[in-house]
Image (cartoon, coloured by chain):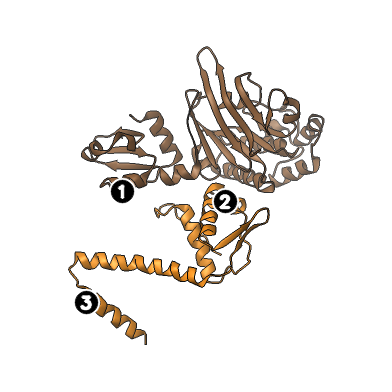
Chain colours: A orange, B brown
Amino acid sequence: MNIILSNSSGIPIFEQIEKAIKEAIFSNELREEDMLPSVRSLANELKISFLTVKRAYDGLEQAGFIKTIQGKGSFVAPKNLDLIKEEKLKEIQGYIEKIYDISKISNISEEEIKELFKMIFEEEI
Amino acid sequence: MDNNIELQNVSKKYKDFELENISFNVPKGCIVGLIGENGAGKTTTIKSILNITRAEGTVKIFGKDSKENEKEIKEEIGVVLDDSFLSEYLTAKQVSSIMKDFYKNWDENKYINLLKEFNLPKDKLIKDFSSGMKMKLKIATAISHNPKLLILDEPTSGLDPVVRNEILDIFRKYIEEDETRSILLSTHITTDLEHISDYIVFIEKGKIVFNLPTDELLENYGIIKCSKDDFTKLDEKDYIAYKKGKYQYEVLTSDKNVIRNKYNITIIDKPSIEDIMLFYIKGEK
């Protein structure tokens, strides 16, 4: 698993860790029941505070991607396809919002955007 | 008990300096950095914890009163102070035979292995060691009785970046070996803390200015760079301190998201711990 952190990206470090672990889960690099590194060992490895890693793990646990068993460690939770879909939809929504912003500024109509979408989807086939 | 050290209202009055109501905790499994200018009270705080300086207030170590249980507690602590060490006319090997008498739990094998790991010669006189080697020897000596708590005063000052990094790795390993351990270290090299500490306690003129998780300082704090006009629009409660320049204002905020949402300000830089410290000490309020 790769966890590549940037100090200058403006994205909080704990979010970058969450994202890297989610990506590893999506790509099946981390599978159900796989054990994650302990909070302290990951913190030491990434040379960051233990609390930052804990925050990332807490976030992943709340979102249902991992589960933590007291005294044993954190494990990848059974894959929830709905969860993954929801996550990806959120990502797509972000892009669409950007498209919306650009189209508003440059006076491009909804129809024209829809036409573009159609073209791209049809190209696929 | 979740804290290895608890300080409550620790105060000490000297003729020209006063430590005032210092209270903070060192939680289990955490590395806490004590920062401040020279003479701010870092060493006095550490010496009060160790009962070398008799101070008012209570210090609990491992949940026990540090004055009443001093002997028992000291068996479980490793200490590195600036001015403490055995004779320079000893070899690293001879140090071990002396320490054996000090600590019930002295682990000679561990010590010899640490010397090897840190590349320290066993039979050379300490006086011929470089300052980096001396510090590594002090740390090896401090952790070879497997203490639950490590307290260090300025362990990285005066050392080059490579040795400093080696020392930080030693601390990381020490904590990872047993996650109920803690480290309290004082330093004025704040960049070291960005990569190792979980909490930072900032002392200035004998008082605590803040005690915060390192990631909160690095993620939530921001330095706004703006024009005088933009500065005058800022609500006083939204910033901590500012520096007035000829061409720009620099303003420290503890929550850059508030600034982003509330004002039309585009440049908010990520501060270093040193930047934050300088704003508190030198900035206008």
Image quarter in which the C terminus of chain A is found: bottom left
- The residue that mark 3 highlights is A111
User: For the residue labelled by badge 3, is the local secondary structure a helix, a strand or a loop?
Assistant: helix
The residue depicted at 77 percent of the width and 43 percent of the height is: B110
Give the chain of mark 2: A
The spot of residue B264 in percent (x, y) is: 25, 47
The three-letter amino acid code for the residue at tag 3 is: Glu
Q: How many marks?
A: 3
Sequence-first tag of 3 and 2: 2
Q: Please name whichever residue, A7 or B198, is drawn nearer the observer in this view of the structure.
A: B198
Q: Which residue is mark 1?
A: B261
Labels 3 and 1 share a subunit: no
Instruction: Find out whether the residues at labels 3 and 1 contact each other: C-beta distance under 8 Å.
Output: no
Q: Residue furthest left?
A: A107
Quarter placement of the N terminus of chain A: bottom right
Amino acid under disc 1: Asn
Q: Is residue A98 above or below residue B177?
A: below
What is the CA distance from the residue labelled 3 to the residue labelled 1?
Answer: 33 Å
Whole-percent x, y for residue B184 in the image = 60, 35
User: Which residue corresponds to the image point at 77% horizontal and 37% vertical from the top-left?
Assistant: B123
Horizontal and vertical percent position of residue B47: 62, 24
**Looking at the picture, do discs 3 and 2 lie on one chain?**
yes
Residue located beneath label 2 in the image: A43
Q: Residues within 10 Å of mark 3 (few under 14, many from 20)?
A: few
